[in-house]
Amino acid sequence: MITVAEQVGTYLARLGVGHAFGVVGSGNFIVTNALRAARVPFIASRHEGGAATMADAYSRMSGEVSVLSLHQGCGLTNAGTGITEAAKSRTPMIVLAAESAAHQVHSNFAMDQTGFARALSAQPERVHSAASALTDTFRAYRTAVRDRRTVVLNLPLDVQAAEALGEIPQLGVEPRPEITPSQGELEPLIEALARSERPVFLAGRGGRGAKHEIAALAQATGALLATSAVAKGLFHSNDFDLGISGGFSSPLSAELISDADLVVAFGCGLNMWTTRHGRLIGPDTVVAQVDVEDSALGAHRGVDLPILGGSRGVAQALLGAFDGRERTGYRTPGVQERIATQSRWDQTPTEDLGTPGENIDPRELSKEINRILPAERIVSVDSGNFMGYPSQYFDVPDEFGFCFTQAFQSIGLGLYTAIGSALAQPRRMPVLGTGDGGFLMAVQELETAVRLELPLVVVVYNDAAYSAEVHHFGEGHDLATVRFPDTDIAAIARGFGADGITVRSTEDLAPLREWVGSDPRRPLVIDAKVADDGGSWWLAEAFKGH
């Protein structure tokens, strides 16, 4: 016989899950091995929190449903922050959570796992019995795929151990069909595009599958292109790409977005980060928002033209309305020249804050690393004062070259993100930008990266502080709780089996050049002693929401 645990693991593999992550305990041992036996790759992390974000990042960067396998009770709670990040980001992910049996009310592991999942913004489901196991598993997978939800599928221990019933069916799940608005619903936006002299298109996560359609519509209507942070790289190499919109924007990009007379958001929430608390959009600018969910339209700010529909279908329909005509709009030779020469932060003059022999300006550090690393890369970013530097100074080849796990604004997810992203895009060099606080919070997973032989570049912007708080509260407060002694992070990295170097100047990056050219099979951690920037340019924007 086979057990329900074995049946569930095998069925998920047959349905098409791409990769599994987790920490194995007694409660999830059998189901995890069933996944492995069915040829689903499994990565054993050092902490459930790391596994959760690895699974999240893998799904984002591969387009496949990932699996997180957890022990009952404490295994699930340990993964809570990562599950919340995934759920808030609408990552299609299955959390296989072992669960104490209903009669085990006095078990040390007993807890309200359904209530906990709801509190994390995830969708709770359960395998109720041997008779319903296949139906319950299919429902969970279907919800993940069609609704783009993070689903916690609870597996009670007594049900897991029961004899499986029924044959595993040959069923597949197709993504939910796109909503297509009528011509009448699109007419106001068509008219707005026809009138606009300075249109800007903002694409978010929901626009990632419509890159070519949005770009073609922008060309036809004379629109400039920009993205939210999570969609960085979507319009890479387009002559009219402004990069990330919002707090990370360069001065020129912010100026051109602010001067738009029409902003069309494709699958983009228009939240405070993307719009600088609304100030990036002019008071007279017409705002249109395209989204597949009614609840998303106008959720963060009022919009003049809400359009319920998928980004690809809407962009195609709008393009058809222009019937091959092309308007100049915002795409003048002068604007093109300004974008080519001024839209990037590394084209923006800044004072070098570094002190020779002591520390390095984080901008000079980032520019030099960007020059050294190969173009085929996948960049992940942790949270902190430093985060604008890797986000804006590190180039990426496309939308699958940047993973930004910041929906929950937790520090410490960066290393986990980088590992999951690397496994999703194995032909690209993985790169992580992190602060000393976030890196040390997650450092146990460096062993996982070493074990996996990942050629991962970890850039630690090390200022020996939680500097977001240092700069937010300022010298008028007692900052002893957010400042720390200098830590030799390079030595710690070598202790885990990685390579480690300390950098205080661009000349100290010479070992990075050698490492890149050596066909590396283990991570390199760069302990960059960075100068105090007085609070990064994006930080003032960020804390206006606190």
Image (cartoon, rainbow, N blue to C red):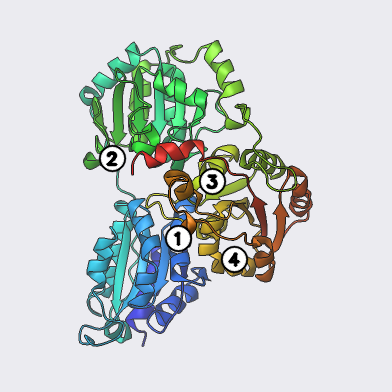
> Residue 522 appears at what percent x and percent y?
68, 63
Pointer 3 residue: 386
Nearer the observer, disc 4 or disc 2?
4
Structural crowding at the residue carrying mark 2, measured as other residues with C-alpha within 10 Å and reported as few (<14), some (14–19) or many (≥20): some
Pointer 2 residue: 292
Query: Mark 1 falls on what kind of element?
Result: helix
Marks 4/3: CA–CA distance: 20 Å
Pointer 1 residue: 53
Query: Mark 2 falls on what kind of element?
Result: loop
Tag 2: amino acid: Val
Q: Give whichever of discs 2 and 3 has the lower sequence position.
A: 2
Q: Give whichever of discs 4 and 3 has the lower sequence position.
A: 3
Q: Give whichever of discs 1 and 3 has the lower sequence position.
A: 1
Marks 4/1: CA–CA distance: 14 Å
Marks 2/3: CA–CA distance: 34 Å
Q: Give whichever of discs 4 and 2 has the lower sequence position.
A: 2
Residue 446: assigned label: 4
In the figure, is residue 229 to the left or right of 143? right
Marks 1/3: CA–CA distance: 20 Å
Query: Mark 4 falls on what kind of element?
Result: helix
Name the residue: 50% across, 63% down. Answer: 441
Asked which quadrant contains residue 305, the reply is top left
* Residue nearest the viewer, comparing 155 with 319: 155
Name the residue: 77% across, 52% down. Answer: 511
Q: Are marks 4 and 2 in contact (CB under 8 Å)?
A: no
